[in-house]
Amino acid sequence: MMRSQQVQLGVDVFFEQDLSSLNGKRIGLLTNQTGVNAELVSTIRLVHDHPDLHLVALFAPEHGLLTNAREGEKFTDAVHCSTGLPVFSLYGKSKKPTDAMMDAVDIVIFDMQDIGARYYTYMYTMAYMMQACARKGKRMIVLDRPNPIGGEAVEGNFIEEGFTSFVGLYPIPNRHGMTIGELATYFNEVFGIHCQLDVIHMKGWNRNLYFHETGLPWVPPSPNTTTVQMMLLYPGTCLLEGTNLSEGRGTTQPFEVIGAPFIDGEKLQDRVNSLGIETIRARATAFTPTYQKYAGEHCEGIQLHVTEPRRIQPLHTFVTVLAEIIDMYPKQVDFLTYGSLKHPMFDLLAGNAELRHGLLRGSLGDYQAKCQSDTAVFMDKREKYLCYR
C-alpha cells in the first residue's frame, strides 16, 4: 500500500539511517499495535527482520501488545506468537521494568502513539522505562509520533504534591501539546531522569496539525480511543472516570457522551446549550453500556459535538458542563472512592482536591485561576524542548 503523506514518522526516519552501530546489541522494544510505519508494517517486524538489529525482547504497556485489554486489566508475561520472543508485561505485577527484564537487553526502543492528555498512561510507562535505563546504564531510543490533537493548545493545571499516580505522574497540564518524543526529553531533563536518550524526530510535522491532517493511517492506541473529536474532548471528559456518571465506556462513543439512569437527556441538552459555549453543542441521547458503569442499564444524557476544533478548551468546557449537572442533580452525582486509594479517583485525575471542592461549593474561580497560572508556567518551561516549529 503506497500512500502520499506530508509527515514522516520517527520509525520511518529511523530505518532510513545507517543502523550498523547497533549491530550485536540486544534490543528490547516497548510498543503495541500503534507501533507501525506509514505502510502499516509493525515496528516489531521491522526490527526483527532487519539484518543489523538483534531483537531479543518485547515490552507491553497497559492494554497489552495488541491493545485489546480493557482499562485497568492486568496481564502476565507471555511469548510473542510469530517471533517466539518473550513479552514482558509492564501492566501486571509491576508497572516498572525489573532488573531481570533490563539485564536481558542493551538498548530499548520505544514506539507508541500518545493522545495528548496527561491521564494517558503510555507516557508514564515510557518514563518508568527511562528510569530503568538510567539505573542500569542502558540506552533508550524514542521514535517520535504526532500529538493527534496538535502541539499548540495547552490547558490545565499541574499535579500537586501528594496527588501523583499512574494517571498523573508528573506536573504537566491536562492537555500538554507535546509529542511523545518531546515529552521524553522534557521528562529526562526537567524531572532528573538523566538516561542516555535519543529521540528520532519526525519530518514534516507542524504543531498546528491534527492527526487526520498528516496523511498517515490512524491506529487506535486503546479500546476506547476513537476519533479526533473524542481525543479533543478527552482532556476534560476523562474526569468523568472519577464520578458515578458514565463516560460512555461500553458504547461506541466513549468520552463523547455523558449520562446516567437518573439524567433527563432533553433537560440536560437544553441546559448545556443555554450556556452559549461556542465550541460545542449538546445533543440529547440515550445509551446502554455493555460493561463498566451501569452495564445493561438504560442511561440518558448528552453527546458533546465539537463545532470549533481549533478553539475548544476541553477542560474548561467539561468542567462548566459538569458544574451544571451537579447543580441539576446535587443528590445523585457522586465522586468515587476506592479503598486502596488515598484520594478520590477524581482528585487523582484532576491533580488536586480544589476542583472537586469548587464544584461542590459552586465556585470555580480559584481553580480556573490556578489553571491559567500553571499553563503559563508550563508554556514557558516547555519552550526549549519543542522540536517542531
Image (spheres, helix red, strand yellow):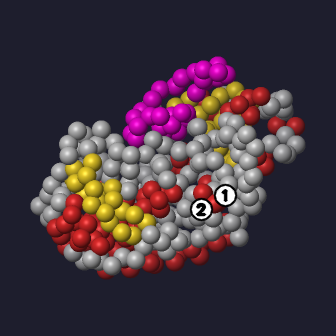
Disc 1 to disc 2, C-alpha distance: 7 Å
Instruction: Name the amino acid, label 2.
Output: Tyr
Compared to residue 211, the image places residue 280 above or below, namely: below
Instruction: Name the amino acid, label 1.
Output: Thr
Tell me which corner region of the image, top left, top right, bottom left or bottom right, holds residue 31.
Answer: top right
Relative horizontal placement of residue 378, taking residue 307 as reference (left or right): right
Q: Which mark is residue 214?
A: 1
Write the residue at 52% across / 25% down.
Answer: 77
Write the residue at 56% across / 29% down.
Answer: 88
* Residue at the spot of label 2: 210
Name the spot of residue 208 as percent of width and height, x first: 63, 69
- Mark 2 Cα-neighbour bin, 10 Å: few <14, some 14–19, many ≥20: some
Span colored in magenta = 60-87
Marks 2 and 1: in contact by CB < 8 Å?
Answer: yes
- Image quadrant in which the N terminus is located: top right
Relative horizontal placement of residue 205, taking residue 364 as reference (left or right): right
Q: In front: 256, or 327?
A: 256
Indicate yes or no whether the magenta region holds residue 134.
no
Q: In front: 213, or 331?
A: 213
Relative horizontal placement of residue 224, taking residue 203 as reference (left or right): left
Name the spot of residue 37 as percent of width and height, x first: 70, 43
- Image quadrant in which the C terminus is located: bottom right
Name the spot of residue 286 as percent of width and height, x first: 25, 52
Element marked by disc 1: loop
Write the residue at 53% across / 54% down.
Answer: 115
